Every structure is written in structure tokens, then in C-alpha cells.
């Protein structure tokens, strides 16, 4: 193979890998857009946002290859597509445990998303104390010449769960030495403390909601809506029209 042929060969390989990876990137972009819409809808209608923040990541080609080798799988794009299901990952952090299940239901209710698998490590924590809700979702990505159906992994957890998982990851995976049993036990105890905190904050959240719902709302408050940093007055004629439709 001549140098020019070799360069062209690598250019084609790069093109193939880029096309393969970009659909996962686009799937994450679509999910981020969906999440942004859900956040804004919830904020506008309920004056509350169940999602604190999101973080997405793509596995590197090197990491994908290492996983193929560990699992002793065939080295091909089809093998990667069929067996490596966490190439694209999205982490959603919520304030409260109830928000986790609310977000899960909202995603499961999206007609273009297919739930392939759900693992509830909140109901059934891992032995080390890890808690989170994992979903595998199939996301349609509309390309110029085809529709690609891409699997992404979604992890939904509270702030406390995320804090614990981040520190546990640093302790176990960032250091090469074995972690002493005493520290393993303390980590599990810390996970239990995080769970207790989540439950306490959930109770406070519910009590605050009850107080808020019991507050008298001035009629004038209900005559305005806020959209995109703009406040709109609702005409009395429109209120009467909608009220009339509701009675029909």
C-alpha cells in the first residue's frame, strides 16, 4: 500500500468511526433538549423544577475497545452496537427521591422513546450501598438519510446519592491499592446516612408543599402568566371563553 493509499485508508476509517460515534452524541443532544423542555414545563405549570442538573458523557473509542476485550466480544461495529449499551450516558440529579420516579415516568411516557430496561438500585441498593435508578432508553436520531435507533444509559439520583457515588468512585477507582474493609464498612454506613437525609428532606418537602397549598392566593395572581421572562395578562374575555368551553 502506497503512502497515499494508506492515508486514504485511514481517512475512510476515521470517517466510519466518526459517523458511528456522532449518532450517540446526537442522541444525548436530543435527550438534553427533552429534559430542558420538561424542566421548563414543570417550572411554568407547577412553579417547581424536579431536576437539579444533568451531565452527559460519551465513552471514548479506547474505553469501548477495552470493554470489548474485557468481555471477550467480537471486534466490530455491530458487536459494539449490540453489546456495549452505555456508550452514551446521561445523569439526571434530582432534589428528592419522589422526583426520581416522577422523571422516570415522564421519560417513559415519551412516545418516541423505548424503555429497554430499568434497574432500581434505590429499592434494592447494591451491596456497597450504591443507590440510583438506571434506565436503558432507545432514542431515535433523525439523520439526513436514515433514522438511527440509539441506546443510551440514563442514571437518575438525588444530590446525596450523587455525592456518595462520586466519592466512592474516587476511593475505589482512582487508587490502585486495595481499600481496607474498615473503609468499605464506613462507606456503606455513609450511604445509609445519605438515605436517611434524603428521607428527612422528602418529609420536609411534603410539609412545605402542604403549607404552600393551604396559602390563600389572590385572584390577581391568577390573572397573569410568565413565559420567557415576559409577563402576560390574561384577558377576562379569554377566561370566560375557556370557562364556557369547560362547561360544554
Image (spheres, rainbow, N blue to C red):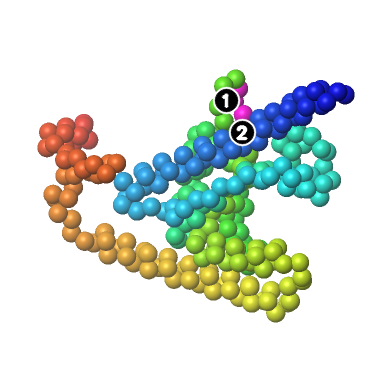
Q: Where is residue 20 in the image (x, y as percent from the top left)?
A: 67, 32
In the picture, the quarter occupied by the C terminus is top left
Give the magenta range: 146-150
* Residue drawn at (23%, 61%) of the image: 214
Quarter of the image with the N terminus in it: top right
Towards the viewer: 203 or 82:
82
At 61% across and 59% down in the image, what residue appears?
121
In this rendering, the answer to whether 147 lies above or below 106 is above
Q: Is residue 244 visible?
A: no
Q: From this viewpoint, which residue is outermost toward the front?
A: 3
The CA distance from mark 1 to mark 2 is: 8 Å
Horizontal arrangement in the rendering, residue 26 relative to residue 240 (left or right): right
Judging by the rendered image, the residue that carries numbered circle 2 is 23
- Looking at the image, is 230 positioned above or below residue 15? below
Does residue 37 lie above or below 172 as drawn?
A: above
Residue 231: quarter of image: top left
**Picture layout, residue 149 above or below residue 163:** above
Few, some or many C-alpha atoms within 10 Å of disc 1 (few <14, some 14-19, many ≥20)?
few
Residue drawn at (44%, 53%) of the image: 51
In the image, residue 180 lies at what x, y percent?
74, 76
Residue 143 numbered mark, or none: 1
Amino acid at each position: 500500500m502506497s503512502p497515499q493509499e494508506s492515508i486514504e485508508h485511514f481517512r475512510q476509517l476515521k470517517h466510519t468511526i466518526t459517523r458511528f460515534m456522532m449518532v450517540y452524541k446526537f442522541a444525548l443532544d436530543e435527550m438534553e433538549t427533552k429534559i430542558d423542555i420538561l424542566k421548563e414545563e414543570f417550572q411554568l405549570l407547577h412553579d417547581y423544577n424536579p431536576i437539579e442538573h444533568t451531565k452527559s458523557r460519551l465513552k471514548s473509542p479506547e474505553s469501548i475497545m477495552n470493554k470489548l476485550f474485557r468481555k471477550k466480544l467480537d471486534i466490530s461495529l455491530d458487536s459494539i452496537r449490540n453489546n456495549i449499551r452505555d456508550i452514551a450516558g446521561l445523569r439526571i440529579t434530582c432534589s428528592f427521591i419522589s422526583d426520581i420516579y416522577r422523571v422516570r415516568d415522564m421519560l417513559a411516557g415519551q412516545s418516541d422513546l423505548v424503555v429497554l430496561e430499568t434497574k432500581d438500585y434505590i429499592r434494592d441498593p447494591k451491596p456497597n450501598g450504591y443507590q440510583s435508578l438506571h434506565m436503558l432508553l432507545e432514542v431515535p436520531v433523525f439523520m439526513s438519510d436514515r433514522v438511527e435507533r440509539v441506546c443510551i444509559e440514563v442514571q437518575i439520583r438525588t444530590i446525596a446519592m450523587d455525592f456518595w457515588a462520586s466519592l466512592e468512585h474516587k476511593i475505589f477507582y482512582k487508587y490502585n491499592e486495595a481499600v481496607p474493609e474498615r473503609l468499605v464498612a464506613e462507606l456503606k454506613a455513609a450511604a445509609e446516612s445519605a438515605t436517611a437525609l434524603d428521607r428527612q428532606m422528602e418529609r420536609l418537602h411534603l410539609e412545605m408543599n402542604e403549607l404552600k397549598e393551604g396559602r390563600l392566593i389572590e385572584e390577581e395572581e391568577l390573572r397573569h402568566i410568565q413565559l420567557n421572562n415576559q409577563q402576560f395578562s390574561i384577558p377576562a374575555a379569554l377566561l370566560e371563553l375557556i370557562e364556557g368551553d369547560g362547561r360544554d
